[in-house]
């Protein structure tokens, strides 16, 4: 009996040792990446809340990556990346990512939507913004078709609520925004019955990405995150979160 007991105990100890080694190896394989983002109502509301943050957690489950997320103002995120203080960040558009950078596959498409007063003619294209006072938000990306058009009088304010108030007071003609943060602002102000917009007719569509450095490690992380995004796309998760397939 003693010999049998010793053999069982020895086998048990070997099993425990093997499990501990496996755990250590798996832990060593996990990549810890520091990412930055910025506050976007409904999408990135804190380091733990928002649809994009939910996506980030889902990418972790699909890859051997664990993200350490910090939020900063938009301009600071972009500057921190340029000087090497931020390793990677999201969301970003192709038009505005730094030249020396690597981007993932797109995980959503930003719909730029025009919001007008109900007594105004609807805006159906970027060209319809020309000659008008157009409300925008500081730090928000609208794409080069809008910001590089010198015929558009783009006026930026601190937040979406300020824009909606300016629109309803007649100080601007139209607000450009999206179906997340801008619509949230309209709902918070309880101005739904005074604002016109058409979710089915955005005036521009912009693909959105994660951005990493262009060196070998950055390209590897681009590929790893892209693979995670593609798995979420096949599962239909991007369609649920962002209406994007």
Image: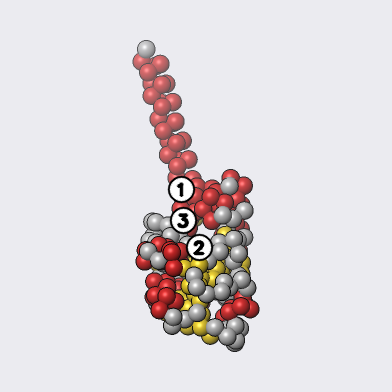
The mark that comes first in sequence, 1 or 3, is: 1
Residue 151 in the image, given as x and y percentages of width and height: 60, 86
* Above or below, 121 relative to 49: below
In the rendered image, the quadrant that contains the N terminus is top left
- Residue beneath disc 3: 51
In this view, the mark in front (1 or 3): 3
Q: How many marks?
A: 3
Asked if the residues shown at circle 3 and circle 2 are in contact, with their CB atoms under 8 angstroms apart, the answer is no
Helix, strand, or loop for circle 3? helix
| Residue displayed at 46% across by 56% down | 51
- Residue beneath disc 1: 27
The mark that comes first in sequence, 2 or 1, is: 1
Few, some or many C-alpha atoms within 10 Å of disc 2 (few <14, some 14-19, many ≥20)?
some
Few, some or many C-alpha atoms within 10 Å of disc 3 (few <14, some 14-19, many ≥20)?
some
Residue 26 in the image, given as x and y percentages of width and height: 49, 45
Q: CA distance from mark 3 to mark 2?
A: 13 Å
Residue 76 in the image, given as x and y percentages of width and height: 43, 76
| Residue displayed at 46% across by 68% down | 195
| Residue displayed at 56% across by 74% down | 121
């Amino acid at each position: 009996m003693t010999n049998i007991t010793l053999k069982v105990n020895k086998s048990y100890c070997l099993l425990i040792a093997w499990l501990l080694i496996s755990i250590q190896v798996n832990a060593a394989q996990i990549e810890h990446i520091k990412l930055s983002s910025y506050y976007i109502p409904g999408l990135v509301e804190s380091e733990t809340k928002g649809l994009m943050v939910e996506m980030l957690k889902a990418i972790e489950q699909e890859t051997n990556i664990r993200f350490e997320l910090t939020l900063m103002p938009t301009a600071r995120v972009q500057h921190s990346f340029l000087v090497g203080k931020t390793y990677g960040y999201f969301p970003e558009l192709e038009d505005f990512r730094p030249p020396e950078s690597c981007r993932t596959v797109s995980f959503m498409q930003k719909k730029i939507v025009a919001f007008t007063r109900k007594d105004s003619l609807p805006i159906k294209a970027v060209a319809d913004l020309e000659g008008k006072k157009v409300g925008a938000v500081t730090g928000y990306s609208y794409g080069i078709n809008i910001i590089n058009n010198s015929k558009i009088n783009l006026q930026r304010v601190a937040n979406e609520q300020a824009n909606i108030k300016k629109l309803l007071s007649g100080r601007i003609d139209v607000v450009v925004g999206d179906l997340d943060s801008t619509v949230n602002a309209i709902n918070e102000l309880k101005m739904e019955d005074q604002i016109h917009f058409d979710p089915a007719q955005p005036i521009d569509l912009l693909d959105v990405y994660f951005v990493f450095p262009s060196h070998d490690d950055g390209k590897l992380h681009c590929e790893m995150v892209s693979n995670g995004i593609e798995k979420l796309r096949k599962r239909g998760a991007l369609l649920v979160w962002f209406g994007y397939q």
